[in-house]
Image (spheres, helix red, strand yellow):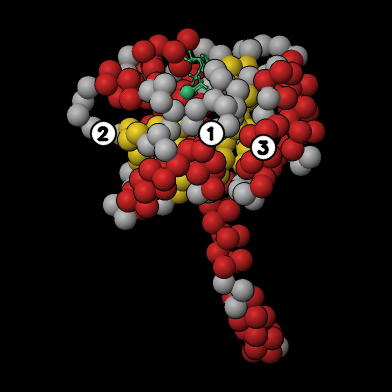
Amino acid sequence: MHTIVLTTQKGGSGKSTLAVGLALAAKETGHVVRIIETDPQGTLSNWQGRRGNGEQLVESAYHAGEVERRLRALMESGVSLVVVDTAGGLTAPMTAAIRHADLCLIPARPSVPDIEATAATLSIVRAWRRPFAFVLNQTPIRGQRIDKAANALCEEAALDLADVLARPLIAMRNDHQDALAAGLAVSEYAPNGKSAEEIRALWQWVEERLSLSSASEALAAAPEIMPALAALAPKQIARMS
Ligand SMILES: Nc1ncnc2c1ncn2[C@@H]1O[C@H](COP(=O)(O)OP(=O)(O)OP(=O)(O)O)[C@@H](O)[C@H]1O
Ligand SMILES: [Mg+2]
């Protein structure tokens, strides 16, 4: 099971919107998905209520201990992907989710105050040494601002752009708001639209990033693999010569 966490202290950045978008894009590709809502604002339970199709995608956990219990239970129940939506601000359930994240996604609108506001969240993610990436959300469909925003994010994280900035950027489009209002994900609301296309591509980026981090974790967790490979190599070379 993989756990991705949408987190940033800045309100209105798109945590809940992207949580739903990514969860349903992953479901489309065959994942068994649950969303954990840790925000008592209840954006996603309300969304679940509007769906009204009986399928329980959203589970609430408003305390740190509950978040951990839910994650353990889901791991044992055959779920392959958990998407955690967190509240704005710096909260205990958010930190609990970050601690268990395979990937933290930090959404930010492309403006200086929004990007500066990621610093506190980023320092918690880094303190727990979790993999992370920024998602630039609500970007103008046209404009010069994006390059500056992307550069600012890279300075914030002091890393190469390709490692820390998820692709594609997610443009500001009404489909996102209309989908949430209808109890749908954007890929259900307008399956052939640009927003659905971007969210599906973002899920692909995330899935690839998840597979990279589990590969490196597997190597770190099994250091005996390296001597085993090293021991094998000379024999093969000897056989070939
Ligand atoms: N790419 C987008 N295009 C258009 N509207 C968007 C987009 N992303 C988010 N929104 C809208 O912006 C508003 C804030 O988004 P959302 O509720 O997902 O943010 P949030 O980070 O979860 O906020 P909070 O911190 O309050 O939980 C919502 O009205 C949502 O529909
Ligand atoms: Mg929210």
Q: Earlier in the sequence, mark 1 or mark 3?
A: 1
The local secondary structure at tag 1 comes to: loop
Taking the spot 26% from the left edge, 33% from the top edge, the residue there is: 56
Quadrant where the image shows the C terminus: bottom right
Closer mark to the observer between disc 1 and disc 3: 1
User: In the rendering, which numbered label is found on residue 122?
Assistant: 3
Percent coordinates x, y for residue 46 in the rendering: 32, 20
Task: Check disc 2 and give the amino acid type.
Answer: Gln
Q: Which residue is mark 2?
A: 56
Gap between marks 2 and 3 measured at Cα: 31 Å
Is the residue indicated by label 1 positioned so its CB lies within 8 Å of ligand 1? Answer: no
Mark pair 2, 1: CA separation: 25 Å
Image coords of residue 135 (percent x, y) = 61, 30
Looking at the image, which residue is at 57% across and 68% down?
A: 221
The numbered mark, 2 or 1, whose residue comes first in the sequence reads 2
Residue 117 screen position, x and y as percent:
68, 25
Q: Is residue 136 visible?
A: yes
For residue 91, which numbered disc appears in the image? 1
Q: Is mark 2 within 8 Å of ligand 2?
A: no
Disc 3 marks which amino acid? Leu
**Location of residue 44 by image quarter:** top left
Q: Secondary structure at mark 2?
A: loop
> Which residue ends up furthest to the left in the rendered image?
54
Compared with 58, 46 (above or below) is above
Residue at 65%, 85% in the rendered image: 231
Nearest to the observer: residue 91 or residue 27: 91
Any mark on residue 237, and which?
none
Q: Is mark 3 within 8 Å of ligand 1?
A: no
Q: Please, what secondary structure does the residue beneath circle 3 have?
A: helix
Report the amino acid beneath label 1.
Answer: Thr
- Count residues near mark 1 (Cα–Cα under 10 Å), then give few for <14, some for 14-19, many for 20+: some
Q: Earlier in the sequence, mark 2 or mark 3?
A: 2
